[in-house]
Image: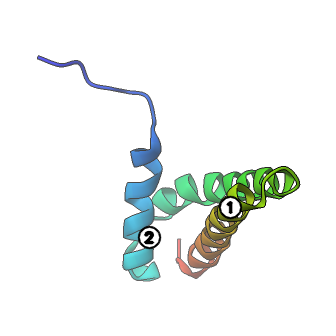
Amino acid sequence: MTPINRHPGPASILVPLRYALLARPETMKASTLEKITWPLLYGGILVLLLGISTLSADAALGWPIVIAGGVLAVAGVLAIYLRSRIKD
């Protein structure tokens, strides 16, 4: 019998995000959306800054990192918008 992994990993953020993007704001729990909003936004900004700093050393490596960080940050902003549409 394998032990249950209690440590949050990427799946703990990505699974609620999938439901957040596919669900209507009226049917989704606010607590689920709040769990993914700030990690997406701040993680995206952090990755974006890492990509920008990598651009000076290697542009071929830096641009994909910049794009990934931008996508994560935009997803965080989208999550903030979706949260504002949910009635408590």
- Which is nearer the N-term, disc 1 or disc 2? 2
Q: Which one is in front, 11 or 6?
A: 11
- The residue nearer to you, when weighing 62 against 15, is 62
Tell me the quadrant of the picture where the N terminus can be found. top left
Residue 26: percent from left, percent from top: 43, 81
46 with respect to 2 (left or right): right
Front-most of residues 32 and 66: 66
Q: Residue 7 at what x, y percent from top left?
A: 43, 28
- Do residues under tags 1 and 2 come within 8 Å of each other at their CB atoms? no
Residue 81 lies in quadrant = bottom right
As measured in the structure, the alpha-carbon distance from the residue carrying label 1 to the one carrying label 2 is 19 Å
Residue type beneath disc 1: Gly
Horizontal side of 27 relative to 51 (left or right) equals left
Name the residue that disc number 1 marks.
Answer: 69
Residue in the image at 68% along x and 61% along y: 69
In which quadrant of the rendered view does residue 68 lie? bottom right
State the colouring used for the structure image. Answer: rainbow
Residue at horizontal 72 percent and vertical 63 percent from the top = 66
Please tell me how crowded label 1 is: few (under 14), some (14-19), or many (20+) other residues with Cα within 10 Å: many
Picture coordinates of residue 63 (x, y %)?
72, 65
User: What residue sits right under mark 2 in the picture?
Assistant: 20
